[in-house]
């Protein structure tokens, strides 16, 4: 799949309109339209692609080729979603809240 097609899928999944998302990411609406247009196959510069991916809580790799990165190769012992799903619901909730709080605390730090 193309960047534009994957971007459209993510926008639909998050229930976001193009104009709303363009404003959220800080890019011009016509520019976003060029990325979403699958006939043109335009991929944004790396810094813009990163902003788009972060705003959609996904990876640039997914937007470019439709494949989520395998973090287990990057970070040893990275827990899988299946392992997390096997935990009791109250523990899952605590982990989710922890991740949310940490991401809020560090979201503006690069």
Image (spheres, helix red, strand yellow):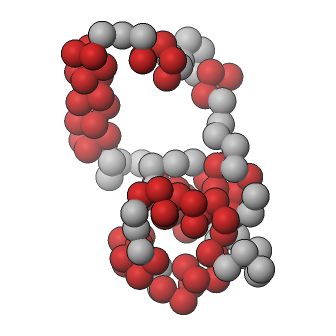
Question: What is the quadrant of residue 30 in the picture?
Answer: bottom right
Q: Residue furthest bottom?
A: 30
Q: Is residue 22 visible?
A: no
Q: Is residue 63 visible?
A: yes
Establish if 29 lies above or below 82.
below
Q: Position of residue 80 (x, y in %)?
A: 53, 19
The tally of labels here is: 0
Left or right? Give the position of 61 relative to 12. Answer: right
Question: What is the quadrant of residue 36 in the picture?
Answer: bottom right
Left or right? Give the position of 68 relative to 40. Answer: left
The residue lying at 76 percent from left, 81 percent from top is 40
Question: What is the quadrant of residue 63 in the picture?
Answer: bottom right
The residue lying at 70 percent from left, 57 percent from top is 64
The residue lying at 25 percent from left, 23 percent from top is 93
Q: Nearer the viewer, residue 41 or 110?
A: 41
Q: Position of residue 1 (x, y in %)?
A: 76, 58
Q: Position of residue 53 (x, y in %)?
A: 52, 56
Q: Position of residue 50 (x, y in %)?
A: 54, 58
Establish if 46 lies above or below 39.
above
The residue lying at 49 percent from left, 64 percent from top is 11
Left or right? Give the position of 26 relative to 6. Answer: left
């Amino acid at each position: 799949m193309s960047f534009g097609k994957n971007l459209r899928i993510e926008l639909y999944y998050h229930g976001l309109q193009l104009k709303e998302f363009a404003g959220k990411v800080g890019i011009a609406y016509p520019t976003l339209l060029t990325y979403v247009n699958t006939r043109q196959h335009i991929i944004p510069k790396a810094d813009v692609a990163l902003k788009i991916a972060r705003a959609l809580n996904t990876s640039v790799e997914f937007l470019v080729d439709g494949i989520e990165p395998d973090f287990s190769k990057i970070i040893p012992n990275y827990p899988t979603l299946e392992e997390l799903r096997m935990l009791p619901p109250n523990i899952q909730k605590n982990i989710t809240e922890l991740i949310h709080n940490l991401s809020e605390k560090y979201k503006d730090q690069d």
